[in-house]
Image (spheres, rainbow, N blue to C red):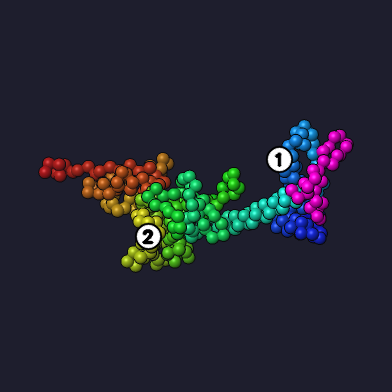
């Protein structure tokens, strides 16, 4: 950092602190203060300000004292109003404090940016339109309507687990975005509740979610002797129930991933059984034949089971009932 000013006064000390924390040349901050002082002069002394003229400020980097000049060619005329020094000092202080706040906020945002894709505990603070402001510890985060779950009832002071989704730019600067609808929330909850997932012995290969209603996850074992589905369900279902509890009752189907696409699609359509799957790999399409008593299970309510299975496998799935045999028809 160039030209670090010698801190002889409170002003210079504050200036150097901001410059150091933000890794800025002190002159950059001084220029910002000068612009703010000219703006203050224009606001407080509109009778003396002329939009057609050029103004400049001499700002003492040690004391913070300011002198305003109007420039006419090579001529500089001091037009500093009596008593304006107090206004200039206040303006300089406000600029420096604002820079400090910005630096602190940027440091906090940078810390959370490193944690994107993980879970965070938070408490709902307030509502701004259809967006929710959440206290996540060192910062406030925002949960847009698109990241909320329609079936969840949110209220002030409610504590929940959130997924750290992204950092977005807004008129208020950088904002931390959290989610309750992202599939990453489910993955993070299983990682928290299932040691085998956390260690990597069990891998979550895919997740398909209808937030607030139902989700399907495909799991795979990277370690011999480890049952991926059983590990995620837990003894007497304790692990999966912990996740369901965090999701306020959202149903979760856990299926075993398979490199054999037909087998994977059949598993994805559980709880339906006895399915015959034929695929067109090039078109990513599958035709599934289901026994009559399994057809409604395979399709699901309003087609939900089939839709989630399609998302999970990446295939467009067409389900049809098995044709009855001639002897069954004659009876």
Q: Quadrant of the C terminus?
A: top left
Q: How many marks?
A: 2
User: Is 72 covered by the magenta stretch?
Assistant: yes
Q: State the mark number for residue 245.
A: 2
Q: Nearer the viewer, residue 213 or 322?
A: 213
Check whether the beta carbons of the residues at disc 1 and disc 2 lie within 8 A of each other: no
Q: Is residue 255 visible?
A: no
Q: Position of residue 216 (x, y in %)?
A: 38, 53
Residue that lies at the very extreme toward the top in this rendered image:
52
Q: Nearer the viewer, residue 101 or 71?
A: 71
Q: Nearer the viewer, residue 184 or 72?
A: 72
Res 233 → quadrant: bottom left
Q: Quadrant of the N terminus?
A: bottom right
Q: State the mark number for residue 43.
A: 1
Determine whether the residue tagged by mark 2 lies in a helix, strand or loop. helix
Q: Position of residue 26 (x, y in %)?
A: 77, 53
Residue that lies at the very extreme toward the left in this rendered image:
331
User: Is 304 covered by the magenta stretch?
Assistant: no
Q: Position of residue 65 (x, y in %)?
A: 80, 51
Classify mark 2: residues with Cα within 10 Å, few (<14), some (14-19) or many (20+): few
Answer left or right for 82 relative to 222: right
Answer left or right for 213 relative to 30: left
Range drawn in magenta: 60-87
Q: Who's the residue at 42% across and 64% down the image?
A: 193
Q: Who's the residue at 31% across and 53% down the image?
A: 270
Q: Who's the residue at 52% across and 58% down the image?
A: 136
């Amino acid at each position: 950092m160039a030209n670090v000013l010698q801190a002889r006064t409170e002003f210079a000390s504050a200036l150097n602190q901001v410059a150091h924390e933000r890794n800025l040349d002190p002159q950059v901050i001084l220029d910002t203060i000068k612009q703010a002082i000219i703006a203050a002069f224009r606001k407080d002394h509109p009778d003396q300000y002329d939009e057609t003229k050029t103004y400049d400020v001499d700002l003492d980097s040690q004391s913070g004292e300011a002198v305003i000049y109007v420039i006419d060619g090579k001529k500089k005329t001091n037009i500093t109003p009596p008593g304006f020094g107090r206004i200039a000092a206040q303006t300089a202080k406000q600029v420096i404090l604002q820079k400090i706040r910005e630096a602190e906020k940027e440091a906090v945002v940078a810390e959370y940016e490193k944690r994107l894709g993980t879970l965070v505990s938070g408490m709902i603070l307030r509502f701004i339109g259809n967006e929710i402001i959440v206290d996540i510890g060192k910062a406030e985060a925002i949960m847009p309507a698109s990241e909320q779950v329609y079936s969840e009832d949110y209220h002030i002071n409610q504590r929940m687990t959130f997924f750290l989704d992204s950092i977005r730019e807004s008129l208020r600067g950088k904002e931390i975005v959290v989610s309750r609808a992202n599939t990453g929330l489910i993955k993070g909850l299983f990682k928290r509740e299932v040691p085998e997932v956390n260690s990597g012995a069990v891998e979550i290969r895919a997740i398909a979610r209808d937030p607030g209603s139902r989700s399907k996850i495909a799991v795979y074992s990277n370690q011999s002797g480890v049952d991926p589905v059983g590990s995620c369900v837990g003894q007497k279902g304790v692990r999966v129930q912990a996740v369901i509890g965090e999701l306020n009752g959202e149903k979760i189907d856990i299926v075993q991933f398979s490199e054999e696409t037909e087998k994977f699609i059949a598993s994805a359509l559980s709880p339906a059984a006895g399915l015959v799957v034929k695929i067109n790999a090039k078109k990513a399409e599958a035709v599934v034949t289901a026994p009559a008593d399994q057809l409604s299970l395979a399709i699901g309510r309003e087609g939900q089971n089939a839709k989630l299975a399609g998302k999970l496998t990446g295939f467009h799935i067409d389900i049809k009932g098995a044709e009855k045999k001639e002897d069954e028809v004659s009876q």
